[in-house]
Image (spheres, rainbow, N blue to C red):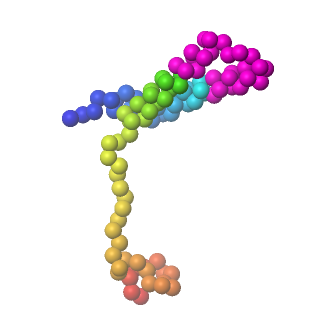
């Protein structure tokens, strides 16, 4: 069974651009909020709506995109090491096991 969500954005470069756009929009909204607060202005209704909608869309959309493009199972590079595989104390020649 194939996961249909994994084909949303398969190109890593495109995903990077999408995430960058989300970050830039979020920074712009935060900067506007800081600007309104700095001048003591009341936040306009359209801005409050935009900030709230962006938070929901970016949070769920970004998380969904990340989940859809992350492997379901982590790959491991763990290599078991036995007692004879480790260098002896003081051994610096790069070989393993008893000298």
Horizontal side of 39 relative to 97 (left or right) equals: right
The residue closer to the viewer here, 80 or 31, is 31
The residue closer to the viewer here, 25 or 92, is 25
Q: Position of residue 55 (x, y in %)?
A: 53, 25
| Residue at image coords 34%, 51% | 75
Q: Is residue 33 magenta?
A: yes
Q: Position of residue 74 (x, y in %)?
A: 35, 49
| Residue that sits furthest to the bottom in the current view | 99
| Residue at image coords 37%, 58% | 77
User: Where, quadrant-wise, is the N terminus in this rendering?
Assistant: top left
> Residue 63's image quarter?
top left
| Residue at image coords 59%, 24% | 25
> Residue 30's image quarter?
top right
Q: Is residue 29 magenta?
A: yes
The residue closer to the viewer here, 55 or 67, is 55
Horizontal side of 28 relative to 68 (left or right) equals: right
The residue closer to the viewer here, 33 or 86, is 33
Highlighted range, magenta: 27-53
| Residue that sits furthest to the left in the current view | 1
User: Where, quadrant-wise, is the C terminus in this rendering?
Assistant: bottom left
Q: Position of residue 90 (x, y in %)?
A: 51, 85
Label the magenta part by its dominant secondary structure.
Answer: helix
């Amino acid at each position: 069974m194939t996961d249909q969500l994994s084909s949303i954005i398969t190109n890593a470069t495109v995903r990077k651009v999408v995430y960058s756009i989300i970050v830039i929009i979020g920074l712009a909204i935060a900067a506007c909020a800081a600007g309104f607060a700095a001048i003591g202005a009341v936040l306009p209704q359209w801005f409050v709506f935009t900030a709230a909608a962006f938070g929901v869309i970016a949070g769920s959309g970004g998380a969904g995109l990340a989940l859809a493009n992350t492997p379901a199972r982590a790959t491991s590079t763990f290599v078991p090491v036995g007692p004879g595989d480790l260098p002896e104390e003081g051994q610096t020649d790069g070989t393993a096991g008893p000298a």
